[in-house]
Structures are given as structure tokens and as C-alpha cells.
Amino acid sequence: MDNYNSQQQFSDFTVVESGARAVPKKFMANVFMWMFAALAISALCAYLFATTPSLLATLVTETDRGMGLSGLGKIIMFAPLGFVLLMSFGYSRLSAPVMTLLFILYAAITGISLSFILLVYTSSSVLGCFASASAMFGVMAVMGYTTDKDLTSFGRIMTMGLIGIVVAMLINFFLKSEQMDYVISIIGVAVFTGLTAYDVQKLKRIGEGITAEGVTIEDTKKISIFGALTLYLDFINLFLFLLRLFGRRK
């Protein structure tokens, strides 16, 4: 659920929109390249920690009630949010190489935190939900890239839905209602599916603005990384909500 802060920071880039029709393909290619690289890093880290007992032992420990998170495990679970906040609020002060390094570290730590999924859900359901998320993300990305309709208002609605999900999840943390969890997951799938189209269209317009406004190479790299972070979060959250809905536990 780190996507809210990303959306807030990402909205600051709308000032570079222009009427230019030519979309810099290199910019969009870099955004998706970094996104896919981050997903690959996360998948590799998740697999390594889930399948290597010595690595997994650093994250979990035995308690009186069974297995629980170790001190490092608790840090790993909350660290991704810290990385997103750091990249969001420190965007203007961070250089492109630092942003890139933080993004890579974020992808690795997120992967480690997701290693628990492979312990809870069956491999087939994880792969099925990942494939479903990939297909949905791909369809909505193409839609956002090719549509001529302005999705700004639609994006605002999706962002409000995202805030509602965060509030509902906090409430349900105390209520522990399975029915409410199910409803939240359905809404989560809808929200992040919609945000994918909205964010891709925004990236497209940012790419046009970069050409028109003469943005520096340094800033272009930073925007590419932050755009990749935004799409990465859209995909990961879509995948997790699908897994909550359809994943089969071991």
C-alpha cells in the first residue's frame, strides 16, 4: 500500500505536460525497463529467501505461540514503506544515481518481504495470480497509452478509492472481519487496475513534456526511475489483492 505517497509525488510532474504529439519512445522504454528489472529483482529475492533455510531463518524465529518474525524480519516488512517515503519526499534533493540505487534496494527488500507469500500460498496459485496480474496490467497499460480520453478525473477517483482502501484496512486490522477483507480486496483490484491506465497516460504526457521543455538528462533519469516505481507499485498491489482473493493456502 505504498502507492499513495508515490501518487502524491508523481502528480507534481504534471507541470511538464505540453501539446507535443511525439512521444519519446526512449523515455517510455526506460520506464518499463526499470519496472521489469525491479520485478525481476524482487522475484529473485523472494525465491531465494523462501527456498533457502539459512536465509529464511534470519527472518523468522520460534516463539511460545509458534513461528514469528525476528527483529530483522520486522524491519524488512516495514522497510519498503520507508524507501518509498524517502524517494518521494527526497526526490528534489536526490541525484539520479542515488535514486537508482534506492530503487534497486527497494525492489530487493520488497522481494524479501514477499518471500513469506511462497510459504503461505501454493506455488500454482502464486503463479496463476501473477499471470493474471500481468495480463490485467498489460491490457490497462496499453489502454492508458493509446486512449485519447483524458483520464485525470478518473485518476482522482482511483486515488480517493486508494485512500479509502488504506482507511478500511486500518479499521479491519482491529475488526479482523473476513467479509470486509474480501470486499477490500475486490475494491483493491479495481483501484489498481484503474490506476495502471491513469499512470501510464500520465507518463506518456510527461514524456511529451520532457521533449518540449528541454528537461535535463539528470532529471529525465530521475523521472524515469520514479515513473518505474509508480508502475511497479501498481503491479505489486494488483498482484497482492488478486492473491488475497484467489490464492490457495498450503
Image (cartoon, rainbow, N blue to C red):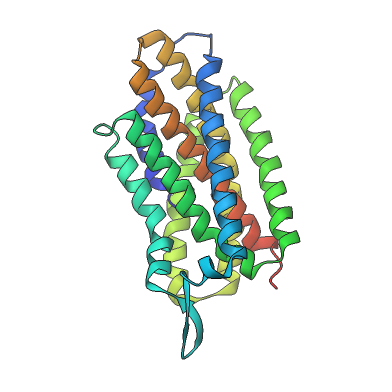
**27 in relation to 21, above or below:** below
Q: How many marks?
A: 0
Instruction: Answer with left or right where residue 195 lies relative to residue 174.
Output: right
**194 in relation to 239, above or below:** above
Instruction: Answer with left or right where residue 52 lies relative to residue 213.
Output: right
**230 in relation to 206, above or below:** below
In terms of depth relative to the viewer, which is nearer, 118 or 151?
118
Residue at the image point whose x is 55% and y is 53% from the top? 45
Residue at the image point whose x is 37% and y is 64% from the top? 75
User: Residue 136 location, x and y as percent?
Assistant: 68, 41
The quadrant of the picture occupied by the C terminus is bottom right
In terms of depth relative to the viewer, which is nearer, 23 or 26?
26
Residue at the image point whose x is 39% and y is 61% from the top? 78
User: Residue 109 location, x and y as percent?
Assistant: 45, 54
- Identify the image quadrant of residue 144: top right
Instruction: Answer with left or right where residue 132 lies relative to residue 228.
Output: right
**199 in relation to 189, above or below:** above
Residue at the image point whose x is 37% and y is 46% from the top? 84
Can residue 20 be seen here? The reply is: yes
User: Residue 9 location, x and y as percent?
Assistant: 35, 37
User: Residue 42 location, x and y as percent?
Assistant: 54, 49
Identity of the residue furthest to the bottom in this view: 64
Can residue 3 be seen here? The reply is: no
